[in-house]
Image (cartoon, helix red, strand yellow):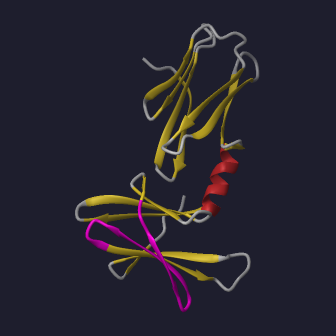
């Protein structure tokens, strides 16, 4: 039976990963689970504070759980992803990716655009795309099953907003998922 001390949902391009941390404060045990799979187990870890580093997702994104003394006999647990605090990582991710969720042919699809690389992910896998310049911006074409899709990138005309990315599937605009 798990005695989970901390839990995080880490959203990456390949999907949402559940990170669980067990901390036996009397036994010194530390166990890290990613998506239900045990990735670290340490018995008799004294001192009780410190850190555990592991990887998350297909891209093997570096994650670190920091264990620090809290008030009284308690402990505080923080998660860092790619060297950033979890909160900073989530804020940065919302600026560097766009995510859409759609239902086609009785299946759910999660499409993610990584703006810095222009990689497109579908249900946890990078998919093949073809870029094309058009009059008002660019279009990144790909297929999901038998459906024709593209991500249209156009300038917002405002420096603070930057480029606006829109997913079009079978000539229909799909609303973006807000994280």
Residue situated furthest bottom in the rendering: 135
Q: Considering only vertical position in the picture, is 64 above or below 48?
A: below
130, 137: nearer the viewer: 130
Instruction: Name the residue located 67 percent from the left edge and 47 percent from the top edge.
Output: 87
113 magenta-colored: no
Q: Is residue 159 left or right of residue 100?
A: right
Image quadrant where residue 52 sits: top right
Q: Residue 14: horizontal and vertical position, in percent?
A: 46, 50
Q: In which quarter of the image is the N terminus?
A: top left
Image quadrant where residue 78 sits: top right
The mark tally for this picture is: 0
138 magenta-colored: yes
Q: Considering only vertical position in the picture, is 82 above or below 90?
A: above
Q: Residue 168: horizontal and vertical position, in percent?
A: 41, 77
Residue situated furthest left in the rendering: 105
Instruction: Name the residue located 53 percent from the left edge and 45 percent from the top edge.
Output: 59
98, 55: nearer the viewer: 55
Q: In this view, does 81 lie to the left or right of 111?
A: right
20, 114: nearer the viewer: 114
Q: Give the range drawn in magenta.
A: 127-147
128, 152: nearer the viewer: 128
Q: Main secondary structure of the magenta part?
A: strand
Q: Considering only vertical position in the picture, is 123 above or below 158?
A: above
Q: Residue 7: horizontal and vertical position, in percent?
A: 55, 34
Q: Residue 97: horizontal and vertical position, in percent?
A: 57, 62
Instruction: Name the residue located 72 percent from the left edge and 15 percent from the top edge.
Output: 73
Q: Quadrant of the C terminus?
A: bottom right
Q: Is residue 45 left or right of residue 69?
A: left
Q: Considering only vertical position in the picture, is 86 above or below 163?
A: above
């Amino acid at each position: 039976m798990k005695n989970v001390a901390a839990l995080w949902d880490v959203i990456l391009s390949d999907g949402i990963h559940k990170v669980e941390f067990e901390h036996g404060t009397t036994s010194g045990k530390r166990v890290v689970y990613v998506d239900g799979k045990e990735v670290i187990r340490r018995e008799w870890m004294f001192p009780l504070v410190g850190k555990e580093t592991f990887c998350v997702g297909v891209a093997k994104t570096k994650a670190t759980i920091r264990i620090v003394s809290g008030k009284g006999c308690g402990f505080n647990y923080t998660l860092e992803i790619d060297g950033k605090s979890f909160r900073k990582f989530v804020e940065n991710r919302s600026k560097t990716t766009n995510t859409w969720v759609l239902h086609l042919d009785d299946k759910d699809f999660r499409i993610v655009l990584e703006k810095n690389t222009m990689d497109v992910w579908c249900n946890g896998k990078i998919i093949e795309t073809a870029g094309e310049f058009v009059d008002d911006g660019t279009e990144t074409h790909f297929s999901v099953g038998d459906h024709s899709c593209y991500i249209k990138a156009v300038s917002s005309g405002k420096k603070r907003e930057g480029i606006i990315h829109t997913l079009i599937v079978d000539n229909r605009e799909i609303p973006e998922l807000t994280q």
